[in-house]
Image: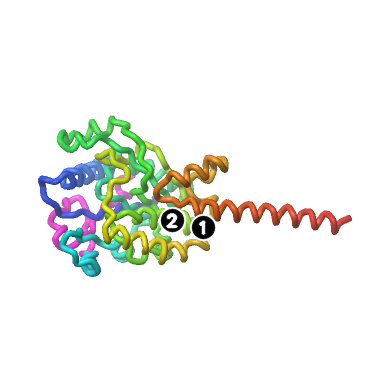
Amino acid sequence: MTSVAHIINPVKVSENSDFFRSQQITFESLKRAKEFSRFKENIRLYAVGFAEDEVFIPADFSVLSNLTKSSKDRFPNPDLKKLPFIDEILRKTQEETFEDFILYSNMDISVMPYFYDSILNYIHKGYDAVVINRRRLSKNYLERNEITEMYADLGKSHPGFDCFLFHRDLLDKLILEDVLVGVPFLETALLHNLFSLAENPLFIPDAHLTFHLGMDVLNFPRNELYYHNRKTFFKQIQPKLKPHYSIQKFPYATLPFPKRVLKWGLNPSLFIRNSFELEGKGVLRKTKSLLDELRWRILQR
């Protein structure tokens, strides 16, 4: 039976903060989903963080060795958060876990009780990478803290990417450089890696599988950390991934051309220029194929 390692990165924060309450809901939802699963023995929950975060991690989670690098090494500005690098998180996952599939989700993402059974179903259908969009729920739930009410609320869709499942073999192929966790372009880097390097990826835009407390969509500071991640993706990651880009693997591939281009243009984690380049390559391939066929028919006369 296929096994899944679910990796999260808890952060020690003030107990009076919204993020503290959000993390508690995430912990509880993961524990409930594992207990609910028919295949609970094949689901393992892992947490990884800095040394100061370890006391915050519940006993239900296996703790990986502490992270050693952070944004503070490069950006000592005291006003900026101390954030880890996704590459170190996944490297420790590779070294200290053994499951067939890796599942990484942001710390403010909670899951439905049937989440893991759904994940395993996608795996059994032959997908080697799955990206799931969350549902948005009202932040008022942070005060009530009643998780069953959250389950019952369908909420609203969200365009971002924050839950990533992929086969263990992809760990050696991912190109993540020094992208930081908790900053925009993390999801962009993971998405483009998985849909470039996986053989059979799947995008799930609007299923009721995960949820986040808060209705904001693009509410983030454009500080040094943001521009660092942005530059890292466009200057270091994308040039190496581009030879692997294929319109057939990316989200919205099955939609008609006009709708596909529109979706690329509206999604903040995809880029319309890439869409036009890939569409153009497809047109050139089809044109060449038609011209070649014409040549062969003329030669056969």
User: Label 2 neighbourhood size at 10 Å, few (<14), some (14-19), many (20+)?
Assistant: many
Q: Which residues are magenta?
A: 38-66
Magenta residue check for 119:
no
User: Label 1 neighbourhood size at 10 Å, few (<14), some (14-19), many (20+)?
Assistant: some
| Residue furthest right as drawn | 301
Secondary element type, mark 2: helix
State which quarter of the image contains the C terminus. Answer: bottom right
If you read the primary sequence from the N terminus, does the residue marked by circle 2 or circle 1 appear first?
2
- Residue 209 in the image: state x and y as whole percent: 34, 39
- Which residue does the image show at 17% across and 59% down from the upper left? 79
Q: Which mark is residue 245?
A: 1
Q: Residue 142 appears in which quarter of the rendering?
A: top left
**Do callouts 2 and 1 mark residues in contact (Cβ within 8 Å)?**
yes
| Horizontal relation, residue 228 to residue 27: left or right | right
Q: Which mark is residue 131?
A: none
Secondary element type, mark 1: loop
- Residue 89 in the image: state x and y as whole percent: 29, 61
How many numbered markers are drawn?
2
Judging depth in this view, the residue of 259 and 170 nearest the camera is: 259
Residue 16, compared with residue 57, is above or below; it is: above
- Residue 10 in the image: state x and y as whole percent: 21, 53
As shown in the figure, which amino acid type bears the numbered disc 1? Tyr
For label 2, the residue is: 192
Q: Residue 132 appears in which quarter of the rendering?
A: top left
The coloring applied to the image is: rainbow
As shown in the figure, which amino acid type bears the numbered disc 2? His
- Residue 84 in the image: state x and y as whole percent: 25, 61
| Horizontal relation, residue 177 to residue 61: left or right | right
Judging depth in this view, the residue of 273 and 46 nearest the camera is: 273
Task: Measure how far apart labels 2 and 1 are at the Cα level.
Answer: 8 Å
Magenta residue check for 57:
yes
